[in-house]
């Protein structure tokens, strides 16, 4: 019996796939189809796949062409499969010509002409396109705009804000609006990252115009305002999503699941450190109201694992702040420690600009601890460490584009209604905001 094997993602199964499977089947007597796992696709940069593995397998099964379906989970698996299943022929579309010549050592490699004019990418870009407008005064926006190139069906509708922050090539490519409402009207969703007071106004304006919003954290510095903004989103039937990268890192999500499933036992303490050696005095040039302070800039990230593991409901908090020397009259913090006590644990969130800590995350449990090295918020690696170091485990998950592209893919899915639960819950946003509000109101102990 001649065995043939072929591989693919088979997202939104189309006639190109069916045509390929038919021809592959005819090459032998028995066809094995390898369908890529969700994880494997993400690891190799295919982040736009619409259907989960189970649906893609079902679609391949329903063609009636596969005698056996297997899951492709890792780089190099094809060699293992060819050996394990005694495969005679490896068949794949001509878009891969020469790429799999190395398999000739194990079986016959056949490249079948690709069907013209159709692909999963094409089908994905037809449905639920987003015209995303950018409102910003921060150079970080360049990264976000560039990352849209990796996300199917997000088009950049334009930019409003301080054009001097845009990199030269983007300035030439993107339409720059003089009027914010004009950009909002030309978009069906907005990415907003502005200075503290301005950001709230723009988010409200976009929501009132019935546009979806991805607003960089912190959303605002008042719990009441945060409630108002989420209510506005609900009344206008649009989505308001907090802009943060860490929640979209695969490694961070695996870590959360592992903690919840008890790998380190019962967590008792979480320590997260986010610091950078920026010189704030010169960045803000005396206009401190124009920039986010260390706590407002960093704490949403630093608090995230604490509020997602221990929950948003802490018992008591104590905050220690070191203020910018020239801002003695204003609550502008350079270094902040937020200590939260829970019924069964404690947490410390340490943030600072012009200070440098180890930027790690540690979660202590009664069986072992998790250690995420610097910079922990760009999570791609973590270790689970036990008393007996022979039991230690290390985990690595590729992170491309600092998590921005994953964040954009998820935002698009939320906007399209494919996902209804946001990674960062409203309750977590409200608790983050309430802690930042305490700092704004001066509810802290000062150190010199
Ligand atoms: N294929 C084909 N003709 C097409 C599309 C795909 O012959 N028009 C073949 C590919 O060459 C591959 C198999 O179908 O052997 C599975 O391809 P897959 O990557 O899942 O589909 P694409 O449509 O190419 O997906 P994408 O656009 O996401 O790359």
Image: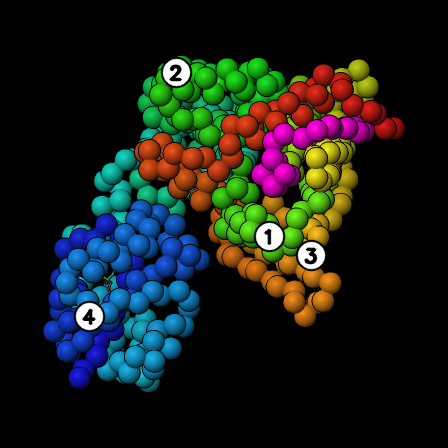
Which residue shows up at 70% across the image and 35% down it? 343
Task: Based on the picture, tell me whether residue 398 belongs to the magenta stretch.
Answer: no
Question: Residue beneath label 2, please?
Answer: 235
Total marks placed: 4
Residue 168 seen in this snapshot? no
In the image, residue 77 above or below residue 212: below
Of residues 178 and 413, the one nearer the viewer is 413
Question: Residue beneath label 3, please?
Answer: 368
Whichever of callouts 2 and 1 sits on the residue coming sooner in the sequence is 2
Can you tell which of label 2 and label 4 is closer to the viewer?
Answer: 4
Provide residue 159's location: percent of width, then percent of height. 43, 27
Whichever of callouts 1 and 3 sits on the residue coming sooner in the sequence is 1
Whichever of callouts 4 and 1 sits on the residue coming sooner in the sequence is 4
Question: Residue beneath label 4, please?
Answer: 67
Region rendered in magenta: 305-324
Image quadrant containing the N terminus: bottom left
Looking at the rendered structure, the secondary structure element under dot 4 is: loop
Question: Residue beneath label 1, please?
Answer: 262
Viewed as shown, does residue 149 lie left or right of 32? right
Q: Residues within 10 Å of mark 3 (few under 14, many from 20)?
A: many
Quarter of the render that holds ligand 1: bottom left
Q: Residue furthest right?
A: 448
Looking at the rendered structure, the secondary structure element under dot 3 is: strand
Could you tell me how far apart the alpha carbons at marks 2 and 1 are, in whole angstroms?
A: 39 Å
Image quadrant containing the C terminus: top right
């Amino acid at each position: 019996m001649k065995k043939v094997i072929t591989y693919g993602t088979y997202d939104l199964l189309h006639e190109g796939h069916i045509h390929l499977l038919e021809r592959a089947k005819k090459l032998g007597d028995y066809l094995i189809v390898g369908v890529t796992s969700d994880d494997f696709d993400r690891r190799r940069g295919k982040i736009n796949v619409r259907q989960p593995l189970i649906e893609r397998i079902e679609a391949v099964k329903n063609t009636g062409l596969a005698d056996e379906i297997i899951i492709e989970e890792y780089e190099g698996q094809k060699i293992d499969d060819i050996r394990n299943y005694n495969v005679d022929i490896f068949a794949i579309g001509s878009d891969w010509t020469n790429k799999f010549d190395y398999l000739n050592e194990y079986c016959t490699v056949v490249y079948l002409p690709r069907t013209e004019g159709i692909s999963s990418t094409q089908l994905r870009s037809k449905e639920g396109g987003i015209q995303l407008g950018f409102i910003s005064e921060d150079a970080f926006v360049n990264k976000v705009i560039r990352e849209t190139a990796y996300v199917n069906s997000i088009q950049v509708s334009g930019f409003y804000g301080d054009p001097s922050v845009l990199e030269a090539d983007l300035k030439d490519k993107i339409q720059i609006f003089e009027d914010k409402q004009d950009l909002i009207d030309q978009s069906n969703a907005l990415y907003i990252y502005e200075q503290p007071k301005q950001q709230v106004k723009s988010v409200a304006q976009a929501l009132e115009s019935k546009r979806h919003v991805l607003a960089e954290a912190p959303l605002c510095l008042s719990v009441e305002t945060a409630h108002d903004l989420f209510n506005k989103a609900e009344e206008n039937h649009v989505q308001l999503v907090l802009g943060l990268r860490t929640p979209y890192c695969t490694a961070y999500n695996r870590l959360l699941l592992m903690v919840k499933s008890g790998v380190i036992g019962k967590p008792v303490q979480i320590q997260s450190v986010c610091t950078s050696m920026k010189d704030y005095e010169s960045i803000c040039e005396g206009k401190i109201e124009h920039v986010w302070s260390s706590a407002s800039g960093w704490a949403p990230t630093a608090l995230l694992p604490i509020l997602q593991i221990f929950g948003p409901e802490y018992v008591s908090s104590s905050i220690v702040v070191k203020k910018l020397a020239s801002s003695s009259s204003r609550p502008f913090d350079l270094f902040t420690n937020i200590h939260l006590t829970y019924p069964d644990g404690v947490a410390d969130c340490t943030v600072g600009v012009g200070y440098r800590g180890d930027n790690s995350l540690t979660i202590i449990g009664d069986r072992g601890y998790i250690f995420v090295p610097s910079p922990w918020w760009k999570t791609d690696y973590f270790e689970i460490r036990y008393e007996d170091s022979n039991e230690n485990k290390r985990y690595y998950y590729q992170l491309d584009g600092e998590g921005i592209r994953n964040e954009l893919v998820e935002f698009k899915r939320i906007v399209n209604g494919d996902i209804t639960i946001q990674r960062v819950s409203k309750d977590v946003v409200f608790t983050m905001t309430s802690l930042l509000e305490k700092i704004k109101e001066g509810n802290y102990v000062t150190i010199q």
